[in-house]
Amino acid sequence: MLMSRHCLYCDKVIDELPLSFMLEDDPLCTECRKSLKAKWRHIYIQGCKIYYLYDYSSFFKDMLLQYKEGPDEALKIAFLGFYKEYFRLLFKFYDIVYVPSTVTKSKMRGFLPMEEIMKPLGAQKYAEVYLYEERIQSGKNYKERQKMRSNYYLKKKIDPRKRLMIVDDVLTTGSSLLGVYDLFKDKCRHILLFCLANVGEKTK
Ligand SMILES: [Zn+2]
């Protein structure tokens, strides 16, 4: 007997395609997958190339909100979906550094959203990044953005031979991602910057 699969996000029954046994199962139905509109593009912020997979559409926003604040931890496999294998190959030789969220937020959720999303890639986490200050107004004006950008520190000595991928969920001004990048940029030659979704050009 065939069991029907349900979309992890909208719960609709997933119509299996004739050749779906040849593809990695996607936990989302075709409609949800389409609405996510994966792009895999890059933009430059202050001369730094930042890759992203999605536009920060209202659909993406709602799904991320349900995942993070629901919290609906099961959704963790929906974001990379069938791009997982592609990412696994692409970042095979990279360790991951995550842009940290505040301790209060992490405790409330009981899980680290971006780390759970990236886990299936099997990449090592290179180092923990810490925040000097837990609460900074995020990026409303230049001064606050600069403050945010210098709000990070490490306790680990950096190995210059490492290839690192610095990762965050949503790219807005870029201050947090670039703030973490600042910790490594003079020490490592191979660094990639990656965000799951990009809010858009108008905010830069
Ligand atoms: Zn769906």
Image: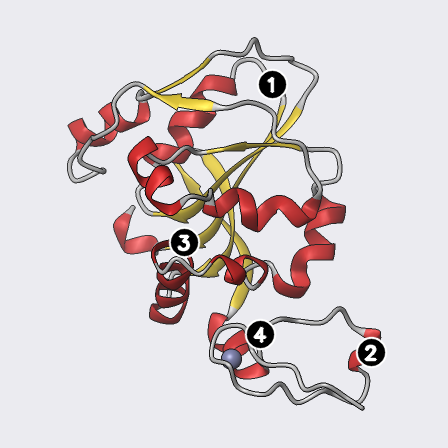
Question: Residue 89: where, in percent of width, then height?
Answer: 76, 47
Ligand 1 within 8 angstroms of badge 3 C-beta: no
Q: Are marks 3 and 4 in contact (CB under 8 Å)?
A: no
* First in residue order: circle 1 vs circle 2: 2
In the image, is residue 159 above or below residue 69?
above
Name which residue type carries label 1: Cys
Q: Say whether residue 137 is left or right of residue 184.
A: left
Query: Which of the 4 image quarters holds residue 7?
Result: bottom right
Q: Are marks 3 and 2 in contact (CB under 8 Å)?
A: no
Q: In the rendered image, which residue does mark 4 sit on?
A: 28
Q: Does residue 132 appear in this view?
A: yes
Q: Residue at x 52, y 83 (%)?
A: 31
Q: In the rendered image, which residue does mark 3 sit on?
A: 198
Name which residue type carries label 4: Leu
Q: How far is mark 4 from mark 1, CA to CA?
A: 37 Å
Question: Residue 175: where, in percent of width, then height?
Answer: 33, 34
* First in residue order: circle 3 vs circle 2: 2
